[in-house]
Image (cartoon, rainbow, N blue to C red):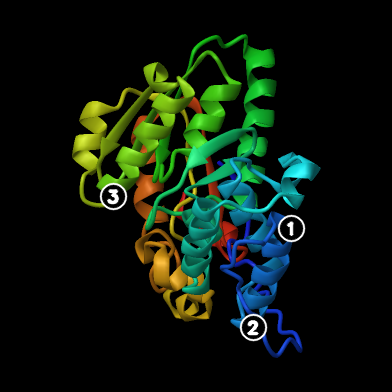
Amino acid sequence: IMFKTIWILNRLMHRHSGVRNCEICMACSITAEQAIRLWAQHFTLHGISEPVLSSQYIISNVLGEKTLECVQRKRLRDTLTDRERERVWELCSKRIARMPVQYVIEEWDFRDLTLKMKPPVFIPRPETEELVSLVLEDLRSIQEESHMTDLQCLEVGCGSGAISLSLLHSIPQLRVFALDQSQTAVCLTTENANRLGLQDRLDVHHLDVIKDADAILSKCDPVDFLVSNPPYLLSQDMETLQTEILRFEDPSVLDGGLDGLSVIRPILALSSKLLTQRGRVYLEVAPCHPPVIQQLI
């Protein structure tokens, strides 16, 4: 079994400035450029993490682009329309309430895919992009050595579909059986798969790896590898997370119990029954977990 140790605890980047007063202008003569500066100041006053990036992402989204770099220079200097100003106000107010910017703009890029985001489904982090890169690198070497053509994968806890869809996008010969204990997550993964045209090689199921092990075994064929970014934080560490995470994301996808292994144990038990002879498991876990997991297997 191969492990990738990745922290999900991101930096708590609260930046405070000496700005005493920041009027968010709703008048007729405000450009996109001015709105970005004003809202960045306002976010700073409210202790919002990454205030400049938040403002840039939101206003770029209102202008119909992903990032500020994609917005034409002239467009930034144009006066915002009434509807654009109202939309900026609406979205920035959500960010003031600590809603993660991914939920505010309702989409986020994961590797080379743009995925729809919806609370409280877990927001994929850059660390999980590293996990996908590791899996792809390893699988390509296996395919070269063994001349394998078709591959079968099981993902436990698909969330938005980030891992499964990235793998499907990169490996044309792959089929994925994905499951999640959240119906909202199952629907979001399905929607993202349809939007990306990857639905034909993906089976998504509303199943819980702890409660529905027998159902999973009956529905899922043997797989060449299992991949998962399971809940692995120790319960005692949950209260240290950012307000954005605690207020809007599903805690069950983060809280791994007293030792962080409450979901990982059932995953390992399931893998022993579903993996092919040369099957592999790829997990995103806490730095303290690999030695313990080695003992479990």
How many neighbours does mark 2 have within 10 angstroms: few (below 14), some (14-19), or many (20 or more)?
A: some
As rendered, which of 280 and 59 lies closer to the eye?
Answer: 59
Residue 45's label in the rendered image is 2
Q: Secondary structure at mark 3?
A: loop
The correct choice, above or below, for 258 with respect to 60 in the image is below
Residue 241 visible:
yes
As rendered, which of 160 and 80 lies closer to the eye?
Answer: 80
The reply, left or right, for residue 80 in relation to residue 245 is right
Q: Which residue is mark 3?
A: 182
Q: Secondary structure at mark 1?
A: helix
Q: Position of residue 223 (x, y in %)?
A: 41, 25
Query: Which amino acid type is marked by label 3?
Result: Ser
In which quarter of the view is residue 249 placed?
A: bottom left
- Spatial CA span between label 2 and label 1: 19 Å
Residue 53's label in the rendered image is none
Q: Which residue is mark 1?
A: 33
**Given this view, does label 3 or label 2 mark the residue nearer the observer?**
2
Query: Which amino acid type is marked by label 2?
Result: Leu
